[in-house]
Image (tube, coloured by chain):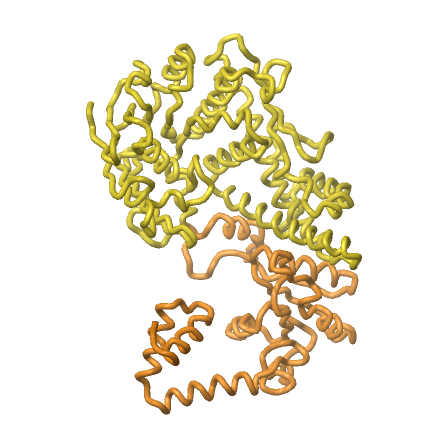
């Protein structure tokens, strides 16, 4: 798939922008702070309904404007789909697909798939566990948009349960009797939603394992091997091998409507039971997918804290390249976005990466100076300056 | 800003649910231009509703007397109770004309975020109603969202030892709709709750 046209209104620094795009490589170059990243950020937003740079939508709306609009014509199997998103900070965003109003923003997920490489990716290796959980969950949603709902449900149950634990903890401290009669109910709902999320994450890690290893080997020959380890907050003894979704499904299948969700749900319930005393003292939920970690091993050591800056970069790139391979294997070649990454890499890695992505159906690159774009990525060139986007080659 | 009383009216209307400042202004000017008789009738209705309407002592539904119409109706089946969150849910179920039992209005759903626990709902009243053993089936018709589901699960656990038949409304596809427009969660639920076609 590729984006044939991108149109922005009051998005970031752009009052208006119309950018026609071709398949193949397109590079946006220009001095810093002129709006190169804003263009690819908009493309990424259409794919994930979130920015790769900020958490909320408010910074995406141009200063003084009430709303921002992103329009993208996405071509898949030669058929164009027009996606329009209206960002209303503080209120519900609106979406249109092929000029039809009758859609929710969530329906847009899956129409465009992107894999975005950015300087922020270094946090995948060096940052908090939350960065790695988000990496997994976003990839899950890109592969199966339905899981966006599962993820939302889980977050919501978690909030309710934490609210209950917190009020119970406060009541205990004040010497009053805690209101715990509903805790079992929330446990059950948390286990059900959590087990589904967990099962998908475990299968995803199993699918990524060989792809990350070979991508790392390509980027930094002889430097590995890499190993991904899904570490559950439930500790040892949890069935963390691949095939979890299938196992959970066969456990619920035939069990009638709304069965409990198989061995993972049972494990979560057990772990919550064991942690209950501690949870009541601290007033937060201590087990579940929201406390899990994706361990990134390089050779015998964890990459976080032990890998060099260059190795960390290679690892982050390998994770993104593996996502690309995985999405590609599902069908529907994703759009590759390389936002300002080449300036961060040494010559060898820069060339390796360029070779690996050069064959993509559409590759969007941003760089401050044209020399930062490797020769392997020849294609269309745009200059970006003062909010103007002009084709130069 | 308008002068005195006009602005007061706009402010009061703006406090109503679903009415924004623009709508409040439009309604206020509509009232200003209306026939005084119509306006007095509206004011009267507002006063009456606060003075006369109470909540049924049995089921918690809105009522003009101590007991609501459904609870007083001898033709309704006393053995079946449909548990709902709000009085407006009673109206929704009544519209189906399918249900011949009685109701119990909880007054909300369990939501720790909003500080609503089981003690804030009319659950104790429900247990009192079940004490004499007349009721044999309880239909849990709370909203099909997270809080409604949690409330239903809580009630089901609470009632299980009493040996009652406890059922939950089915989730699934809207009648007369298209399969392709159903969202994944609803469609997934419909698959879970599929039933054997008896032909």
- The residue shown at (33%, 32%) is A33
Q: What shade has chain B been given?
A: orange
Query: Can you tell which quarter of the image residue A82 is in?
Result: top left
Query: Can you tell which quarter of the image residue B38 is in?
Result: bottom left
Q: Residue B131 placed where, x, y %?
A: 78, 73
Query: Can you tell which quarter of the image residue A279 is in?
Result: top right
Q: Is residue B109 above or below residue B43?
A: above
Name the residue furthest top.
A222
Q: Residue A388 placed where, x, y %?
A: 23, 34
- The residue shown at (73%, 40%) is A271
| Res A278 seen here | yes
Q: Residue A135 placed where, x, y %?
A: 51, 32
- The residue shown at (62%, 51%) is A257
Q: Residue B104 placed where, x, y %?
A: 64, 72
On the rendered image, what quadrant is the N terminus of chain B found in?
bottom left
> Of residues B177 and A5, which is closer to you in this image?
A5
Image label count: 0
On the rendered image, what quadrant is the C terminus of chain B found in?
bottom right
Left or right: A312 as drawn, with respect to A374? right
- The residue shown at (48%, 48%) is B184
| Res B181 seen here | no
> Of residues A231 and A99, which is closer to you in this image?
A231
Q: What shade has chain A been given?
A: yellow
């Amino acid at each position: 798939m590729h984006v044939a046209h991108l149109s922005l209104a009051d998005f970031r620094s752009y009052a208006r922008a119309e950018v026609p795009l071709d398949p193949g490589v397109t590079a946006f170059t220009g001095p810093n702070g002129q709006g190169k990243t804003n263009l690819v950020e908009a493309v990424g937003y259409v794919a994930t309904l979130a920015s790769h740079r900020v958490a909320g939508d408010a910074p995406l709306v141009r200063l003084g404007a009430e709303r921002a609009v992103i329009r993208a014509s996405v071509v898949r199997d030669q058929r164009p789909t027009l996606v329009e998103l209206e960002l209303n900070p503080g209120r519900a965003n609106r979406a249109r697909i092929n000029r039809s109003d009758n859609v929710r923003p969530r329906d847009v997920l899956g129409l465009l798939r992107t894999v975005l490489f950015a300087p922020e990716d270094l946090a995948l290796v060096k940052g908090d566990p939350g960065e790695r959980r988000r990496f997994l969950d976003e990839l899950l949603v890109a592969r199966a948009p339905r899981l966006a709902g599962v993820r939302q449900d889980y977050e919501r149950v978690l909030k309710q349960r934490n609210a209950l634990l917190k009020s119970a903890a406060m009541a205990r401290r004040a010497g009053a009797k805690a209101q715990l009669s509903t805790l079992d109910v929330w446990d059950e709902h948390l286990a059900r939603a959590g087990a589904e999320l967990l099962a998908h994450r475990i299968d995803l890690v199993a699918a990524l394992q060989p792809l990350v290893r070979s991508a790392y080997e390509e980027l930094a020959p002889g430097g590995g091997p890499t190993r991904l380890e899904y570490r559950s907050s439930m500790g040892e003894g949890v069935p963390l091998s691949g095939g979890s979704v299938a196992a959970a499904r066969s456990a619920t299948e035939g069990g009638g409507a709304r069965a409990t969700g198989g061995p993972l749900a049972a494990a979560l319930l057990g772990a919550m039971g064991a942690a209950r005393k501690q949870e009541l003292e601290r007033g937060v939920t201590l087990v579940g997918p929201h406390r899990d970690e994706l361990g990134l091993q390089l050779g015998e050591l964890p990459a976080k804290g032990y890998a060099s800056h260059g190795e960390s970069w290679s690892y982050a790139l390998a994770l993104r390249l593996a996502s690309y391979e995985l999405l590609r294997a599902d069908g529907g070649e994703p759009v590759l976005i390389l936002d300002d990454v080449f300036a961060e890499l040494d010559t060898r890695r820069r060339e390796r990466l360029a070779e690996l992505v050069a064959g993509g159906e559409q590759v969007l690159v941003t760089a401050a100076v044209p020399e930062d774009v490797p020769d392997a990525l020849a294609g269309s060139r745009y200059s970006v300056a003062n909010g103007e986007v002009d084709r130069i080659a | 800003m308008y002068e005195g009383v006009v602005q007061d009216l706009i402010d009061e209307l703006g406090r109503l649910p679903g009415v924004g400042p623009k709508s409040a202004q439009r309604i206020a000017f509509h009232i200003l231009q209306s026939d005084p008789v119509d306006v007095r009738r509206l004011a009267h209705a507002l006063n009456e509703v606060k003075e006369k309407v109470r909540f049924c002592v049995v089921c918690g539904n809105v009522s003009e007397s101590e007991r609501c119409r459904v609870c007083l109706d001898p033709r309704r089946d006393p053995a079946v109770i449909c548990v709902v969150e709000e009085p407006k849910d009673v109206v929704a179920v009544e519209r189906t004309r399918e249900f011949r039992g009685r109701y119990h209005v909880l007054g909300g759903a369990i939501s720790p975020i909003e500080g609503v626990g089981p003690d804030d709902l009319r659950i104790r009243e429900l247990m009192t109603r079940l004490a004499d053993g007349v009721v044999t089936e309880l239909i849990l018709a709370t909203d099909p969202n997270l809080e409604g589901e949690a409330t239903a699960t809580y009630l089901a656990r609470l009632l299980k030892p009493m040996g009652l038949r406890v059922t939950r409304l089915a989730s699934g596809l809207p009648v007369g709709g298209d399969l392709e427009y159903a969202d994944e969660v609803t469609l997934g639920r419909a698959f879970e709750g599929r039933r054997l076609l008896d032909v």
